[in-house]
Amino acid sequence: MDDVVITYAPKAYDDFASKDSEFRSCESKLDKIAVGLNKKFHGKKTTKFFCLPCLANYLDVTVEELLDKVEEFKTQGCDLF
């Protein structure tokens, strides 16, 4: 399966994403949760990331639903968070 190409992502980034990662125009800062969710949904090798609100919009869910999913993934032993 090919990596998903993501259209929106923040300009700023932190230590959770590699310097090769691609970011775009919404200007939100990425945090560990946003990076983990992008990797969980789009593959660990993805280099393009959505911030949490843009990811929720892209997936047509709420930010709260994404955060609930993070807790579910944590209980399943996911190490991305």
Image: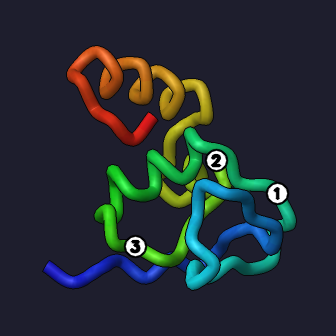
Q: Secondary structure at mark 1?
A: loop
Q: Is residue 25 above or below residue 49?
A: below
Location of mark 1 (residue): 28
Tag 1: residue type? Ser
- Circle 2 is placed at which residue position? 52
Q: Is residue 25 left or right of residue 49?
A: right
How would you rate the neighbour count of disc 3 (Cα within 10 Å): few for under 14, some for 14-19, many for 20 or more?
Answer: many
Using the image, determine if residue 37 lies above or below residue 51.
above
Query: Split into 4 quadrants, where in the image is the N terminus?
Result: bottom left
Left-right relation of 68 to 17: left
Q: Looking at the image, is mark 3 or mark 1 earlier in the sequence?
A: 1
In the picture, the quarter occupied by the C terminus is top left
Q: CA distance from mark 2 to mark 1?
A: 9 Å
- Residue 73 appears at what percent x and percent y? 31, 27
Query: Horizontal and vertical percent for residue 11?
Result: 80, 74
Are discs 2 and 3 less than 8 Å apart at CB? no
Look at the image and name its color scheme. rainbow
Q: What secondary structure is found at the residue carrying circle 2?
A: helix
Q: Residue furthest left?
A: 1
Q: Is residue 32 left or right of residue 42?
A: right
Q: Residue at x 81, y 77 (%)?
A: 25
Q: Nearer the viewer, residue 77 or 37?
A: 77
Q: Which mark is residue 46?
A: 3
Contact check, label 2 and label 1, Cβ < 8 Å: yes
